Image (cartoon, rainbow, N blue to C red):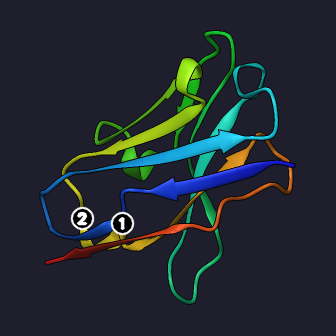
Amino acid sequence: QVQLVESGGGLVQAGESLRLSCLASGFSFARNSMGWYRQAPGKQREAVATIGHSGGGSWYRDSVKGRFTISRDDAKNTLYLQMNLLKPEDTAVYYCRLGVTSSWGQGTQVTVSS
């Protein structure tokens, strides 16, 4: 079955960086688009960045453009999110998702202090 396991979250100060990873299994990772989403307390889950398969393009929400980079290593079945210049408003639980399916990871907490 599909499994998505996120890691790399933590507590950092504003301006610092984190790299999230999502290890995928149970499906053909290289043939699927993937995405990172986040949910802050009291708010709806929102898309942060997505990446296509087979060299497909990427998309970012406006608030993270120029600071976050989504990438993938198909040989390692792993999705990444490099987050630079973090802001307190980036604080949330971050999830990876298989395409637009209902398959989500368990999430990893990112907390950015001011």
Figure check: 34 above or below 41:
above
In the foreground, 87 or 53: 53
Q: Which residue occupies the foreground of this view, 86 or 9?
A: 9
Secondary element under disc 1, as helix, strand or loop, is: helix
Q: Which residue is mark 1?
A: 90
Residue nearest the observer in this picture, 99 or 78:
78
What amino acid is labelled 2 in the image? Lys
Position of residue 4 in the picture relative to residue 87 (left or right)? right
Mark 1 residue type: Asp
Viewed as shown, does residue 97 lie left or right of 102?
left
Q: Residue 52's image quarter?
A: top right
Q: The C terminus appears in which quarter of the rendering?
A: bottom left
Residue that numbered label 2 is attached to? 87
Residue pictured at 54% horizontal, 34% vertical:
78
Q: x, y percentage for residue 109?
A: 43, 72
Q: Residue at x 36, y 57 (%)?
A: 8
* Residue drawn where x is 66% and y is 60% of the image: 105
How many neighbours does mark 1 have within 10 angstroms: few (below 14), some (14-19), or many (20 or more)? many
Query: Residue 89: percent from the left, percent from the top?
Result: 34, 71
In the displayed orientation, state which residue is furthest to the top.
55
Q: Is residue 19 above or below residue 112?
A: above
Going by the image, does 2 lie left or right of 73? right
Label 2 packing within 10 angstroms: few (<14), some (14-19), many (20+): many
Q: Are the residues at dot 2 and dot 1 in contact (C-beta closer than 8 Å)?
A: yes
Q: CA distance from mark 2 to mark 1?
A: 5 Å
Give above or below for 4 relative to 80.
below
Position in image of residue 102 (x %, y %): 85, 57
Identify the residue at horizontal 69%, vertical 19% (top origin): 53
